[in-house]
Amino acid sequence: MKKFTPRDLKTHLDQTPEPPLLLDVREPWEYETCHIEGSTLIPMGRIQSTVESLDKNRETVVICHHGIRSRAVAIFLEREGFNNVINLEGGVDRWADEVDPQMQKYS
């Protein structure tokens, strides 16, 4: 599994012709509070039941609050045969600090 810092992800999003799936695995209330533009919400608890609907070959960046849940989901996706998975280190909390200081934060 690859890892991106928020700055790495921002640069990648600005440069890539085909955007990756930004897979946000937080709970709905967290996503409603703040999220990275263009991300798709599938809470961690629903990943197993929805994994078949995801493209195993598409670049997938997994996102959560601090990068811990997303890492667990990224490991799961790799075990399910996904071959281009990236974990966002520090999650949306670090994204707000480094990329989007206007983003609302929560604890």
Image: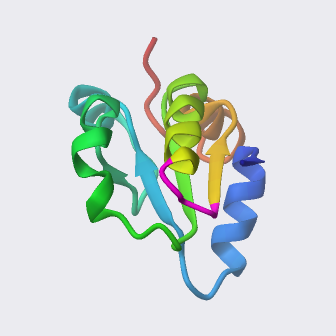
Give the x, y percent position of residue 56.
Answer: 47, 67
For this view, does 75 lie left or right of residue 12?
left
Give the x, y percent position of residue 59.
Answer: 57, 68
Picture quarter containing residue 37? bottom left
Query: Is residue 46 a member of the stretch shown in magenta?
Result: no
Question: Which residues make up the magenta segment?
Answer: 80-84
Q: Is residue 89 visible?
A: yes
* Residue 22, placed above or below residue 107: below
Give the x, y percent position of residue 17.
Answer: 61, 88
Picture quarter containing residue 18? bottom right
Q: Main secondary structure of the magenta part?
A: loop
Q: Residue at x 65, y 32 (%)?
A: 94
Give the x, y percent position of residue 9.
Answer: 69, 57
Q: Residue at x 46, y 50 (%)?
A: 36
For this view, does 10 lie left or right of residue 39?
right
Viewer-side residue, 83 vs 34: 83
* Residue 68, placed above or below residue 42: above
Q: Is residue 102 visible?
A: no
Q: How many marks?
A: 0
For this view, does 52 lie left or right of residue 77?
left
Query: Is residue 82 a member of the stretch shown in magenta?
Result: yes
